Image: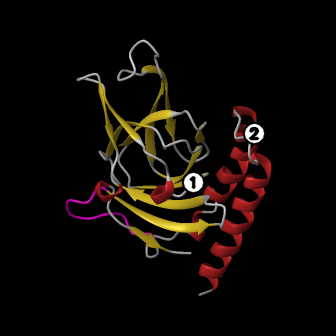
Amino acid sequence: MEITQDRRDAVRDTAERMLGIIGDAPTVERLEQAKPHLMALAERAELFPAEDFPAPAGDVTDRTYLIYDNPQGAALYAITAIPGMTYRPHDHGGSWAMIAAVQGQEKHDLYLTDPAAPGKPILKDTLTCEPGTAVSLTPEGIHAIEGVGTEPLLHLHFYGTRFEDQAERTEYDLAAGKTDVFRMEAFGFIEDKR
């Protein structure tokens, strides 16, 4: 039980510190200032043991655990996944996002919108989120995710708005040049680990 309370305290303190930095203006600069705090939490792998956050099994490629939320709607999740897990390009319905790795590697393709071709965002950069690194997105950010490497992933995903409260999220079908509305029921379920 001690590890559960230690995790709750560390998660709450980290989230509140970060939210104090980001405030109501999630600029690139503020997200960059907050990022080291999420990375420091992710470095505390002992707070996220496999028995509390098991990797998915069978046909399931990822599992989501809510570990913090607040009345203003921010939420922090621990997400486990297997290499090969993918999410096509998507936004977060106007929410900022930040991801830091406890273990494993997650490739993020980062995109910019193209006003001339709304269904075909332009690839801007590719980053690998692994222990010691983090990725952040402003509310306009678009990214695609792929679990790479050979070990299971456990990453911390922090959002200005809970998944279930994010406004209409958009997914991009790059091959067809069209967009789809992301539906929460396609996401699976979120286990409460607060």
User: What secondary structure is found at the residue carrying circle 1?
Assistant: loop
Q: Residue at x 50, y 61 (%)?
A: 78
- What is the magenta segment's predominant secondary structure? loop
Residue type (three-letter) at the residue carrying disc 1: Thr
Q: Residue at x 24, y 23 (%)?
A: 175
Answer with left or right where residue 139 lies relative to residue 9.
left
Q: Residue furthest bottom?
A: 1
Task: State whether residue 138 is above or below residue 16.
Answer: above
Q: Residue at label 2?
A: 30
Q: Residue at label 1?
A: 161
Q: How many marks?
A: 2
Q: Quadrant of the C terminus?
A: bottom right
Q: Name the residue nearer the viewer: 9 or 70.
A: 70
Task: State whether residue 85 is above or below residue 27.
Answer: below
| Distance from Cα at disc 2 to Cα at disc 1 | 17 Å
Q: Name the residue nearer the viewer: 190 or 37.
A: 190
Q: Name the residue nearer the viewer: 168 or 173.
A: 168
User: What secondary structure is found at the residue carrying circle 2?
Assistant: helix
Task: State whether residue 95 is above or below residue 163.
Answer: above
The segment highlighted magenta reads: 53-61
Scheme of colours in the image = secondary structure
